[in-house]
Image: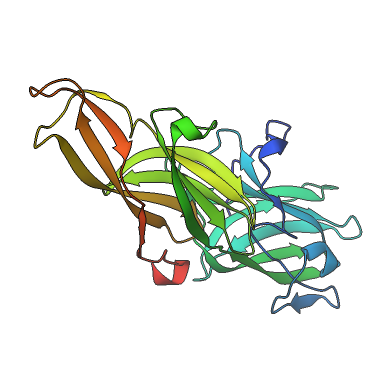
Amino acid sequence: MTKQDIPRNSSIDRRTVLGLLSGGLATLAGCSSGLSDSSDGGGGPPEEQSGYIEETSIEIVENGRQLALEVAVTDEIEPSSVSIITESGREFSSDYFSSGETRTRLSLTEGEDSYEPLPRGQHTLYLRGDDVETELPLELGTTFEFEEAVPGTEHEEIRDDSLGVVVRNIGQRTGAATRTILNGENKDSKAFEPIKPGETGIVEFTFLLADGPHCVKVEETTLREEELTVGFLWSDPVTVIQPIQYTDRFDSTGNGCKRTLAGEPEEVTTTPTKTEMET
C-alpha cells in the first residue's frame, strides 16, 4: 500500500471543511459486532452506525485543489491501516496508523498536477487493526440545478464585467463547483467551493460582459448565443445557453463594443458524469 502525502498539521484551513458526513459528501456505515464486519449502508453519520468510527469529514487541503478524507477511530481499538477501495475494486489511497494514533487522512485526489478527484459512485472504506477488519460504504454524489444568470453589476461576489451562473445543490450531499467552460473551451479551474444541500452558489464567468475596444460589425447590433457550462465534483455539469448582445458603442467603423444580456438563458441537457465503473 502507498502512503499518501497528505498533510497532518494545522495547515488545513478548517473554514473550507466540506462538512461532517451527517450532511456532507459521503455516507459511511458499519457496526462493531465482530472481528470481520460488513455493512450494506444506511443513513446517518458513521459515528452513529459504527463502533469503530468516531468522526469523519471531507476537507480541502492546502492549495484548494486537493481533497482528503479525515478518519478518526475510537481509542478502544488499535487500528493499523485504512484504505479507500473504488467501485471497480482499485485501491485509490491508503495510510497506516502510527502507534497510539487514532486519526489519519486519506487522499481523495490523485495526480501531482491534475488532482483528479475520486470518481462518484459507491466506494468502500476498508479499516484494519488488531481484532478489527471491516468494510464501510463510501458514497460520493449529488445533483446541481441551474437557477439564474446574473451580471456582475447585480452581484457583489463577482466582477462587474463578469457573468455569474447561480446553481443550487438539490442533492443530499455537499458538493463543489470546480471549473467553467465557455463554448466547449475550458476557461477557469477554480479552487473547490463547497455548496451544501439546499444552498446556492454563484460561479463566475470572468470578463464575459467586459466592453471591448472592437466590435464585429454585422448590423447595428449582434446577438450571440454563448454556451456556459459549470463543472462540479461528483455531480453532472450544468449547461445553459445565454444570448448576449454586442452593441457598437461609437460609430459605423466598430470602434468599441458593449456587451449586455439579451433574453433568458435556456438550460440544456448534458452528458452525465461517469462513475468509476463506467470509465
**In the depicted view, which residue is nearer to us: 93 or 20?**
20
Asked if residue 204 is positioned above or below residue 73 in the image, the reply reads: above
Residue 8 appears in the picture as rendered: no
**Left or right of 92 on screen, residue 250:** left
Residue 39 rendering spot, x and y as whole percentages: 72, 77
Residue under the point 82% across and 75% down? 35
**In the depicted view, which residue is nearer to us: 159 or 112?**
159
Asked if residue 189 is positioned above or below residue 169 in the image, the reply reads: above
Q: Quadrant of residue 12?
A: top right
**Left or right of 82 on screen, residue 206:** left
> Quadrant of the image for the N terminus?
bottom right
**Left or right of 33 on screen, residue 85:** left
Q: Quadrant of residue 210?
A: top left
> Quadrant of the image for the C terminus?
bottom left
Residue 107 rendering spot, x and y as whole percentages: 59, 49
Q: Quadrant of residue 13?
A: top right
Residue under the point 33% across and 32% down? 209
Residue 54 appears in the picture as rendered: yes
**Left or right of 25 on screen, residue 233:** left
Residue under the point 74% across and 64% down? 128
**In the depicted view, which residue is nearer to us: 110 or 244?**
244
Residue 36 rendering spot, x and y as whole percentages: 77, 76
